[in-house]
Amino acid sequence: GRSDDMMIVRGVNVFPTQIEELILKRPELSAHYQCVLTREGPMDNLTVVVETRPGLSPESIEARAAAKQLQHEVKVYVGSSVSVDLKPEGGVERSQGKARRVVDLRERKG
C-alpha cells in the first residue's frame, strides 16, 4: 500500500488496500468503499462505508451477514475494530480520477 493513505486507528496502522482486499473477497459487496475516520472522546473510530453489489439491498440478510463477516475479518487480519455501513449501489461518493478512499473527519488538535 502507499504510505500516504495509511491511517493510524487506535495505534494500529491500517492501509485502505488491506480493507479493499477483504471487501473484494465478498461477492455481496462492490468495490466502491470509503474509510471514514471519526473521533469520539479519545478514541478513533473507523467506519468502512461500502456498497452492496448491484441488485442487493443493504437491508437484506445476505448483505448484513457479509457486513458482519467483513467486520470480523478486518478485526482478525488488520487488528482494528471497525463498523461497516452498507449503502445501496451508488451510495458511495464517486470522484473523478483517483478514488478518495480515506475521509478523515477527526478534529485536528491545533
Image (cartoon, rainbow, N blue to C red):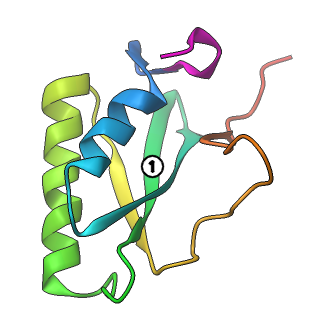
Q: Residue 2 location in percent, x, y?
A: 56, 14
Q: Residue furthest right?
A: 110
Neighbours of disc 1 within 10 Å: few (<14), some (14-19), many (20+) = some
Q: Is residue 71 above or below residue 76?
A: below
Q: Residue furthest front?
A: 97
Above or below 17: residue 92? below
Q: Quadrant of residue 60?
A: bottom left
In the foreground, 105 or 89: 89
Q: Which residues are magenta?
A: 1-7
Q: Which residue is mark 1?
A: 47
Residue at coordinates 39% horizontally, 81% vertically from top-left?
Answer: 54
Residue 86 at x, y percent in the picture: 39, 70
Q: Quadrant of residue 62?
A: bottom left
Q: Secondary structure at mark 1?
A: strand
Residue in the picture at 40% in, 12% down: 11
Judge whether residue 79 is colored magenta. no
Q: Report the front residue among 57 and 9.
A: 57
The part of the image, by quadrant, that contains residue 51 is: bottom left
Give the residue type at disc 1: Thr
2 is within the stretch colored magenta: yes
Up-down relation of residue 89 to residue 30 (above or below): below
Picture coordinates of residue 29, whole percent (x, y): 31, 65
Residue drawn 67% across and 36% down?
Answer: 106
**Location of the C terminus (image quadrant):** top right
Please determine whether, in this image, residue 86 is positioned above or below residue 95: below
What is the count of numbered marks?
1
User: Would you say 105 lies left or right of 30 here?
Assistant: right
In percent of width and height, residue 18 lies at 34, 28
The residue drawn where x is 23% and y is 69% is: 28
